[in-house]
Image: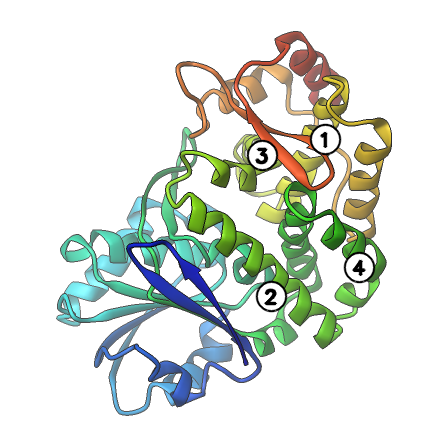
Amino acid sequence: MQTLSVDLGHTRYPIHIGSGLLSDASVWNRGIAADSILVVSSSTIAPLYLEHLKAGLAGRHVAQCILPDGESNKTLSTASWVIDALVGNKVHRDGLVIALGGGVVGDVAGFAAACYQRGIAFVQAPTTLLAQVDSSVGGKTGVNHPGGKNLIGAYHQPIAVVTDTDTLATLPDRELRAGLAEVIKYGCVWDPIFFDWLALNVGALLARDPEALAYAIARSCEIKAKVVGQDERETGVRAILNFGHTFGHAIEVATHYKQYLHGEAVALGMIMAAELSRRLAMIDGGASARIRELVAAAGLPTEIPRIGTERVLELMRMDKKVLAGNVRLVLLEKLGRAVVIGHYEQGALETMLREQVG
């Protein structure tokens, strides 16, 4: 097992990464003292891994709340089911929520934990690559609104992240590829050496080579922990981790969360952000092409859906990064260095959108 740390100054918590951790009682006994626990999982993940987790929690009172799968269920009503389960099982302020699943489960369970009795402890136990490298770390929780993605939420840090890499064995290939989009993002915005490593090892990652996956997960978590440690509430540098997300979220909403997985939409968004960076003469065509090539090599989509410029602009204006009416974008100065820009040539953005989305 490898253990990393997220240090926010006012709090600190571990990220445990390794094989067989869900059923390992010694992991769950490390600073996790609650006896009353609600496990929130999904209809897909619970049959596979809930009993493994219960084995690691033997001797404690464990209740469960099983949610339907899919981004379309990341809603206030779904979060209310979790709160109903907390009330129904008489979980008190010294209780614990464990999110066993992918990003949707983690976001919904964390948001319910943040709201219930004004905040109780929760642990992330991510089972998808995307959740393991991104959404489980950093304390962002929330649900979607018909008007936009993640518009309702709270910052609520977990007390631990328990990443059992064995769960990737049952992850569908498409979900694995979607998770690689977030891994690629870290190379684009922070670590060009990691980007080069990904370009050389993408085949091994797709083949689920254990050593390659373990390194990719650990390096991604190291980068996110460092960024979040500098900027917990996204007032500065943390915003760079949204590279590709403003465009990607617009694609998700415009296609009603039915056509693309989150990572697939982010991959398309990264291609668009890299292209805009090129048009603004921030990076050259070679860097933009390398990003597109790595996205394609990871088996992710590269063809932007024709959803319309005005619709994309409308959805971008609802993005959480809008300040003083300006849509702030995460763009690249070079591979491995991203910046957040609120003032840019609007014409370049609109021209790019008309060519890419119609």
Give the vertical position of 184 relative to 306 (above or below): below
First in sequence: mark 4 vs mark 2: 4
The residue located at (63%, 68%) in the rendering is: 171
Numbered label attached to residue 202: 4
Any mark on residue 218, and which?
2
Q: Nearer the viewer, residue 72 or 150?
A: 150
Q: Quadrant of residue 206?
A: bottom right
Who's the residue at 80% across and 47% down the image? 294
3D distance between C-alphas at marks 4 and 3: 28 Å
Q: Position of residue 192 (x, y in %)?
A: 74, 47
Residue under pointer 1: 274
CA neighbours of label 3 inside 10 A, class few (<14), some (14 to 19), many (20+): few
Name the element at disc 3. loop
> Quick one: which residue is furthest to the bottom in this view?
59
Q: Which residue is denoted by mark 3 in the rendering?
A: 255
- Which colour scheme appears in the figure? rainbow
On screen, residue 74 above or below 244: below
Residue 332 or residue 39, whichever sits in front: 332
Give the CA distance from mark 3 to mark 1. Answer: 22 Å
Query: Residue 159: x, y in percent?
Result: 33, 66
Distance (Cα) linking label 2 and label 3: 32 Å
Mark 1 or mark 4, earlier in chain: 4
Q: Which mark is residue 263?
A: none
Q: Secondary structure at mark 1?
A: helix
Give whichever of discs 2 and 3 has the lower sequence position. Answer: 2
In the picture as drawn, the residue positioned furthest to the front comes out as 9
Between marks 2 and 3 in the image, the one whose residue lies nearer the viewer: 2
Helix, strand or loop status at disc 4 = helix
